[in-house]
Image: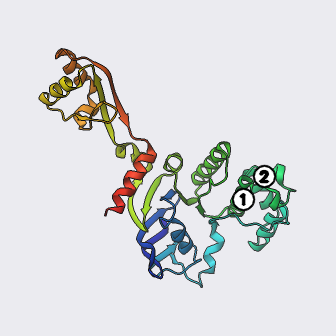
Amino acid sequence: MAVVQVAGLVKHYGAVKAVDGASLTVAAGEIYALLGLNGAGKTTTIRTLLGMIRPTAGSVRLFGTPVTADARSLWGRVGYLVETPAAYPELTVTENLTLMARLKHLPAAAVGNVVEQLGLRPYAARRARELSLGNQQRLALAKALLGRPELLVLDEPANGLDPAGVTEIRQLLKTLAAQGTTILLSSHILAEVAKLATRIGIIHAGRMVTEIAAADLPHHVARALRVRCHDQDTAARILRQGGYQPLSNLDGMLSMTDERAVWHPDEVATLLVESGCPPVHLAVAEEDLETLFLRLTARGAGA
């Protein structure tokens, strides 16, 4: 079943197109990451999905129900964290959570559960204004998790967290998804998203550039066989005669991106050795995930 359905979403602010025809579907139990640079349209999409702003065009459905001003029955099934974490600064962590639990008509035990889940027990009696940025983020996540919502919508959930905290939240979200919670999150960090999401939608300039299953990410990474010999001109000539297409890089390497070279570097090495021009360096290089992300968004900008 589709928990989230966004079709042809458009949101204009005057002449500015914040979202320009974006569509996405998130299935039950899935962790879907909306990935994009700052200003790409991630937060606008999420705010529209949560009924915080009205779309200029397009439709948004949660659990098959259109998101409208009258769709109050939806929000008991949804937990969310959007943009800057908000809390009553003079109330303690426990008091903030207790107030939120009352608004959601939840039992007091729900507060203790999320305090433990988010590692907030040492800070339970501390006022919200005294918390570090990372613990303010934990408090906001605890509010979103109150009552075990069926759908979690999280805008940049790792903001302010140290590496250990990021790892903890990643494991928590994976556990929740395994237990049936559907998660839609936004981020601008592909390397982190790749460790968590089951599917990634890349948004740029308000438009959905592409969707990639996380398991398929390695197939999208560009690879090149990089070669250095003592005599690069001779090596290039030998390789061209062997049917390869070597290009010279700024660092003096010869680079080949054709599949024959990338997937069978041993054949390249054999050709050079037998031709009397043995390589002193030969290795397959892969672009990192950040470079892949920038390449995909650049392609989207040119569309």
- Of the two numbered discs 1 and 2 on the same chain, state the one appearing first in sequence: 2
Q: Which quadrant does the C terminus fall into?
A: bottom left
Circle 1 crowding by C-alpha within 10 Å: few under 14, some 14–19, many from 20: many
Residue in the picture at 58% in, 57% down? 180
**Residue 274, position in %: x, y?**
18, 15
Is 148 left, or right, of 281 in this rendering?
right
Q: Position of residue 128 (x, y in %)?
A: 81, 61
Does 158 sit above or below residue 263?
A: below
Numbered mark located on residue 80 in the image: none
Q: Are marks 1 and 2 in contact (CB under 8 Å)?
A: yes
Taking depth in this image into account, of 265 and 301 the one nearest to the observer is: 301
- Please tell me whether residue 180 is drawn above or below residue 250 in the rendered image: below
- What type is the residue that disc 2 sits on? Leu
The residue at 29%/27% (across/down) is 227
Which element type, helix, strand or loop, lies under badge 2? loop
User: Picture quarter containing residue 136?
Assistant: bottom right
- CA neighbours of label 2 inside 10 A, class few (<14), some (14 to 19), many (20+): many
Residue 84 lies left or right of residue 276; in this view the side is right
Q: Mark 1 is on which residue type?
A: Ala
Residue that label 2 marks: 120
Tag 1 residue: 142
- Left or right: residue 159 compared with residue 116: left
Q: Residue at x 59, y 58 (%)?
A: 156
In the picture shown, does residue 25 fall above or below 189? below
